[in-house]
Amino acid sequence: MSENYQEMWKSLGLDLKAHDGLLGVLGQAYTDVYLAQVGRPKGMDYFNFVMSEVHGLRIKELLDAKAQGRKVIGTYCVFVPEELVLAVDGVQVGLCAGAELGTAEAEKYLPRNTCALIKSFFGFTLAHVCPYVESCDLIVGETTCDGKKKAYEIFSEIKNLHVMEIPQMKKPSDRALLLSEYREFAAVLEKLTGKRITAEGLRRGITIVNEKRKAIARVMDLRRHNPAPISGLDALLINQVSFYDDPVRFTGSVNAIADELEARVKKGEGAVAKDLPRILLSGCPMAVPNWKVPHLIETGGAVVVGEESCVGMRNIRNYTDASGKTVDAMMGAIADRYFQIDCAVFSPNKERLDHIVEMAKDLKVDGVVHYALQFCTPYLVESRNVEKALEGAGIPLLKIETDYTQEDAGQLKTRLQAFFEMLK
C-alpha cells in the first residue's frame, strides 16, 4: 500500500497482527492469480490499484465520509437497494468475505456444517480483520436462506444490524412484502441519517446505480466475442469491486475499459487464445478473494465468458425506472426491479432456469459449470433443475460443490480438464 495505515486500522479496533497476515496472503494470492495473467487490458491497472489499496485508501475515504456526517451501510446481498442509501447521501459497501479466516471463532457460534460464506463473514468480524465491517454505521442482513436468517440472530448481538425479509415466492403478495420491507428500510435510513428521502434524492440514487449497471453490462456483453477480449477472472474482479468502490468513479473506470475492449474486438484481439472451450459459470456468488474455481478453469484450458450469479448478471440484469414523479412511485419502481432477481431462494424459480439457458446460447458457450458452496441448500437443491433445463437445451453441465479451502483444488482441476476435453 502507498501509505502506512497502521494508526487508522488501530483506531478501528483491528487485530493488527492478524490483519497484516491477511493482507500478506491476499497480496500473494492476487499476484499469483491476477498479475500472472498475460494479455490483460490496460484498463485493469485501475483495479490493480483498487486491490492494492483495498484496506487502505478506500477505508480512509469511508472514514472521511463519516467525518463529513455521511453514514456507511454494509450489506451482504444484492437485494439491498443501493438507490435508497444514495438517496440519503449514504455510502453502501459489500461485506461478504470469500476466504476461510476465523473459522474456529465462527464455529463457537455456528454449526460446523454451515456454508463457507456465512462462516467467513462471522470469522472476519470475530477475528477483527475487516475494516469495512468496523467502518459501518449499520449492517443490513436479509433472509435469503435459513442459514443466514438464523446466523443474523447471533450476529445482531455483535453488530448494529437491520434484517430485511425477502419473499420466497413471486406472487403479488410477495411483491407487496418486498415493497413494505423497502419502505421500512427507508425509514431506518431516514432515522439513522436525519435526512428525508425525497423524489429528487431517489432519482439521483437510481440514476447512479443504473449507470453503474450499464457500464458493467457493456463489458459483460463484449465477452460474447471469440476470442474473448477479457478473461473471466478480470470480469469477475470488475463485478466484485463494484460492491465497495465509489459508484461514480467506478462507472467511469468501467466505461473506459469497455471502450478499450470494443477496440480490441474490432481488431480481433483477445485476452485469451481463440477457440478455447467457452464456459458459463453459474451458481453461488464469489466474494473477494474467492477466485479458486475461475482460476482453475482458466489455467486448465478454458475461458469463463459469463457469470450467472449475484456477482454477475443477477446483479446487473435489470434497471430501475426513474421516471416516477413521487417517492411512492419510485419506491414501487425499486421494488419492481429487485423483485425480478432470480435468486435460488425463490420457489418455483423458472426465471433462473430460463436465464441460464438464454445466457448459454447468447454467449455461445460450450458448457456450463455450476458452482455451489458446501451446505448451501438453495443452490445445491436447485442444481438438479438447472441440470434438467440444460439437458433439454443440449448444453453440457459440470456440477461442482466446494468451499473456500484449497484442499480440493487438485481434484477439481482434474474434473474440469476432463470436462473441457469432453467439450472439445
Image: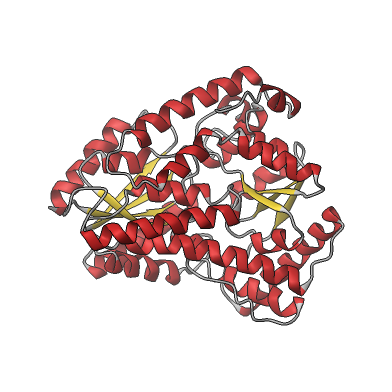
Q: Give the residue at x 29% y 69%.
A: 362
**Does 120 sit above or below residue 230?**
above
Left or right: 275 in relation to 317: left
Left or right: 338 in relation to 403: right
**Does 127 sit above or below residue 110?**
above
For residue 403, what is the image quadrant?
A: top left
For residue 152, what is the image quadrant?
A: top right
Q: Position of residue 126 (x, y in %)?
A: 66, 29
Left or right: 52 in relation to 225: right
Whether residue 385 is visible here, answered yes or no, is no
Q: Give the residue at x 56% y 50%.
A: 243
Q: Position of residue 199 (x, y in %)?
A: 75, 74
**Does 417 sit above or below residue 338?**
above
Q: Give the residue at x 59% y 63%.
A: 209
Label total for image: 0
Q: Give the residue at x 75% y 61%.
A: 185
How are the colours assigned in the image? secondary structure
For residue 331, what is the image quadrant?
A: bottom right
Q: Position of residue 67 (x, y in %)?
A: 80, 42
Q: Position of residue 416 (x, y in %)?
A: 24, 43
